[in-house]
Amino acid sequence: QVQLVESGGGSVQAGGSLRLSCAASVHTYSGYCLGWFRQAPGKEREGVASIYTGTYSTYYADSVKGRFAISQDNARNTLYLQMNSLKPEDTAMYYCAAARGYFCVSDSWSLRSKYLYWGQGTQVTVSS
């Protein structure tokens, strides 16, 4: 069982930055797919970014490429999402997710059904 706890959400003006953190209860430094998803009101949960801890390969949704960066701190068992140049359309509840395997080294990285463990979410609000 893996428990995930997100933090770092908040309110920011457009163009600002936030860094989300996701603390894991177990070591996830090898053989895990770790991902960030978001869900805006009235919309489906969508994949934002993913990292495969075996090779540190990263994947991003087109909407956040060049603005967001996913990273993993093995010593702290913590996943991060650095979000820069935030836009109002980035407003959503952000969730981290995890699962053993290497499915995320393909287009499957954004499939919610592939991830077994989920955090409770942290709210990000970007005002114009």
Image (tube, rainbow, N blue to C red):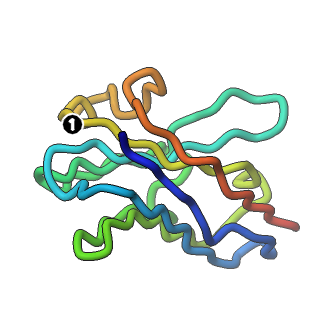
Give the x, y percent position of residue 13.
Answer: 81, 75
Give the image location of residue 2, x and y in percent.
38, 45
Identify the image quadrant of residue 73.
bottom left
The quadrant the C terminus occupies is: bottom right
Residue at position x 69%, y 39% from top?
A: 39
Measuring 23% from the left and 69% from the top, which residue is drawn there?
74
Which percent across, then down, holds residue 75?
24, 75
Q: Residue at x 23, y 47 (%)?
A: 52
Determine the residue located farthest toward the top in the rendered image.
113
**Front one among 37 and 68:** 37
Q: Is residue 23 left or right of residue 100?
A: right
Is 91 displayed left or right of 103 in the figure? right
Badge 1 amino acid:
Val
Q: Residue at x 63, y 51 (%)?
A: 94
Q: How many marks?
A: 1
Above or below: residue 124 compared with residue 73: above
* Quadrant in which the N terminus is drawn: top left
Q: Which residue is mark 1?
A: 105
Looking at the image, residue 63 lies above or below residue 66: above
For residue 110, side relative to residue 17 (left or right): left
Q: Secondary structure at mark 1?
A: loop
> 16 or 46: nearer the eye?
46
The quarter holding residue 103 reads top left
Specify few, some or many for label 1: CA neighbours under 10 Å numbering under 14, 14-19, or 20 or more: some
